[in-house]
Image: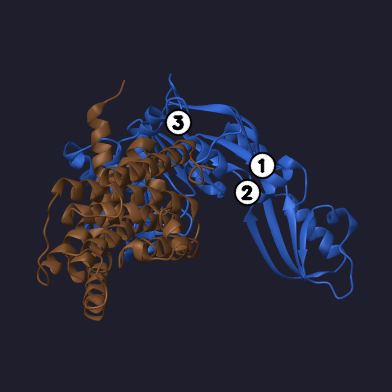
């Protein structure tokens, strides 16, 4: 199978700051791939180098076999990037923007049918002749995605596509993107929501501080790092939390205490210990562990 | 393999976008500078017509018009590329161009041509207004055309440099107020530089605007302070220097690709 994207020892420094410390990563054609990581992990820097918006300090990237620097025209034709910020050109309406964008890629009127298809697929018909400035945030996001698709790129990169998007639209977007994936487009998305990656992506790379710290099938990764959070509000009244459950504490915020659980059975254990010391529970909440927790485990450091 | 259809369509699309951009706000980009120039014309010609005589056989009002046209042409060529770039950078939509296979040369050509078109269009409108007011000969139309093109190109290029260099609107205002305006007013639009004290004459001779206005005026009246071919050579030299600098900046991705 052809490789959609090959990152080869990609490094990037901004002055003394090493934003990327040598990324090696291969994404196969047809994959639905997620790049996860907290803010500042280097995801966007990596995407920017891939898209030609930034240059690597060393290393190379190939998109569908084309080097993003040596053969940038073919690389960019193979790539559709949805930027993270809601950028738009206030002078034009949606359809004009899409036609311009297609034109930059050397596509003329013969491409209009595809543009109509994209507009329809993203439910933009009613807004197609509306100025970009007048669109709501969600509509702007759709227009941005449409812009990335005008030249039918085999590889589509979405940088935090669901930031600030309501649930209904989010579902529609994912349906649309899933369909593109089924048609053979390679999809790469960055996110810091584990659930999204879990629901959609077959493979996940986790980045932290400029490095890939984990690369695996989503299923395996979740199995390895599944965890739950138990958040309790306790009526301590001067009593101390028993020593054997103190080591499970992840964070304290006034009388709210969050425990990090490896297994659900630990809930019983904590309850038991609290009962023994007669500490009353005022409120409780059980949530799935978020990405932060997985990171804490992966990097072994509290930040 | 270069695919010429792709390359042409890419350049043409970017040019069309740049032209539409200023056309959508035509009141601000064309009507406003035309009205400003017409006001200059009305007031200066009224106040100075009987006091200033630059060339023996040319009325002051007629003398003034080519200078005003050229000054507006230059200012608007600069304004087109510079404001388009700074807006795209501040809004962030410059990425839509940077993500595409558009080469640095295509980028340069599209912004350059759009700038020339806006400058020449503004200049032509002022010319039409002036015709209502005074009889203006056109002795050497090709010289007029030549100076209009190279003038628009020079300032369009300078606008690209300013647009790439500036990060914020106030930095752009520095260019406008401390470069473009002084060069415009010390260029002999309103007078012949021979009427200046020696020091200011020497200074004016370093000003490329002076040569563009002087040469442009020659096209109308057949009279100038400097031989028109010398002026054209000097302006072309400035253009080649700035264009090389701009192409270098664009090729390296200076301030556009980090």
Residue at 43% across, 65% down: B197
**Which residue is more in the foreground, B138 or A92?**
B138
Percent x, y for residue A78?
37, 31
Q: Report which residue position mark 1 lands on.
A: A208
Q: Is residue B86 visible?
A: yes
The mark closer to the camera, 1 or 3, is 1
Residues at circles 1 and 2 in contact by the CB criterion of under 8 Å: yes
- Circle 2: is it few (<14), some (14-19), or many (20+) Cα within 10 Å? some
**Which residue is more in the foreground, A167 or A144?**
A144
Q: Is residue A135 above or below residue A61?
A: below
Give whichever of discs 1 and 3 has the lower sequence position.
3
Task: State the mark number for residue A38.
Answer: 2
Host chain of mark 1: A
Host chain of mark 2: A
Residues at circles 1 and 3 in contact by the CB criterion of under 8 Å: no
Task: State the mark number for residue A31.
Answer: 3
Q: Which chain has been coloured blue in this picture?
A: A
Q: CA distance from mark 1 to mark 3?
A: 22 Å
Percent x, y for residue A204?
56, 36
Give whichever of discs 2 and 3 has the lower sequence position.
3
**Residue at mark 1 shares a chain with residue at mark 2:** yes
């Amino acid at each position: 199978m052809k490789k959609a994207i090959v990152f080869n020892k990609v490094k990037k420094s901004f002055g003394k700051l090493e934003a990327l410390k040598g990324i090696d990563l291969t994404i196969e054609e047809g994959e639905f791939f997620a790049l996860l990581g907290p803010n500042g992990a280097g995801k966007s820097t990596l995407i920017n180098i891939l898209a030609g918006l930034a240059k690597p300090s060393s290393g190379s990237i190939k998109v569908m076999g084309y080097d993003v620097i040596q053969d940038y025209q073919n690389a960019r034709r193979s790539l559709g990037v949805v930027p993270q910020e809601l950028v738009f050109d206030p002078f034009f309406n949606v359809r004009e923007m899409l036609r311009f964008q297609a034109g930059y890629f050397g596509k003329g009127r013969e491409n209009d049918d595809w543009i109509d298809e994209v507009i329809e697929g993203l439910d933009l018909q009613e807004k197609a002749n509306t100025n970009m400035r007048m669109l709501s945030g969600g509509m702007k996001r759709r227009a941005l995605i449409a812009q990335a698709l005008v030249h039918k790129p085999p590889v589509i990169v979405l940088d935090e596509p669901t930031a600030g998007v309501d649930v209904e639209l989010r579902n529609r977007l994912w349906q649309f993107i899933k369909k593109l994936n089924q048609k053979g487009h390679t999809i790469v998305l960055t996110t810091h929501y584990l659930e999204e990656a879990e629901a959609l992506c077959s493979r996940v790379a986790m980045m932290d501080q400029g490095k890939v710290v984990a690369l695996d099938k989503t299923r395996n990764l979740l199995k390895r790092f599944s965890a739950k959070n138990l958040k309790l509000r306790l009526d301590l009244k001067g009593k101390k939390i028993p020593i054997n459950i103190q080591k499970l504490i992840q964070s304290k915020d006034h009388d709210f205490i969050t425990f990090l659980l490896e297994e659900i059975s630990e809930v019983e254990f904590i309850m038991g210990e609290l009962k023994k010391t007669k500490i009353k529970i005022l409120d409780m909440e059980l949530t799935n562990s978020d990405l932060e927790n997985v990171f804490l485990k992966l990097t072994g450091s509290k930040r | 393999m270069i695919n010429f259809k792709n390359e042409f369509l890419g350049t043409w699309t970017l040019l069309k976008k740049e032209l539409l951009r200023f056309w959508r706000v035509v009141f601000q980009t064309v009507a406003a500078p035309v009205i400003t120039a017409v006001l200059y014309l009305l007031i200066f010609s009224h106040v100075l017509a009987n006091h200033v005589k630059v060339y023996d056989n040319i009325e002051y009002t007629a003398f003034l018009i080519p200078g005003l046209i050229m000054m507006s042409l230059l200012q608007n060529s600069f304004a087109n590329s510079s404001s388009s770039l700074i807006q795209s950078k501040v809004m962030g939509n410059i990425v839509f161009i940077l993500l595409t296979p558009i080469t640095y040369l295509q980028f340069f050509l599209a912004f350059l041509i759009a700038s020339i078109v806006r400058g020449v269009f503004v200049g032509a409108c002022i010319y039409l207004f002036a015709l209502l007011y005074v009889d203006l000969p056109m002795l050497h139309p090709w010289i007029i055309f030549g100076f209009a093109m190279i003038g628009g190109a020079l300032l369009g290029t300078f606008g690209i440099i300013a647009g790439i260099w500036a990060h914020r609107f106030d930095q752009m205002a520095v260019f406008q107020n401390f470069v473009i305006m002084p060069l415009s007013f010390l260029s002999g639009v309103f007078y012949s530089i021979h009427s200046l004290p020696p020091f200011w004459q020497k200074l004016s001779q370093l000003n490329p605007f002076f040569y563009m206005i002087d040469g442009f005026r020659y096209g109308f009246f057949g009279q100038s302070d400097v031989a028109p071919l010398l002026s054209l050579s000097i302006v072309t030299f400035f253009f080649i220097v700035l264009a090389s600098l701009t192409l270098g900046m664009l090729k390296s991705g200076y301030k556009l690709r980090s």
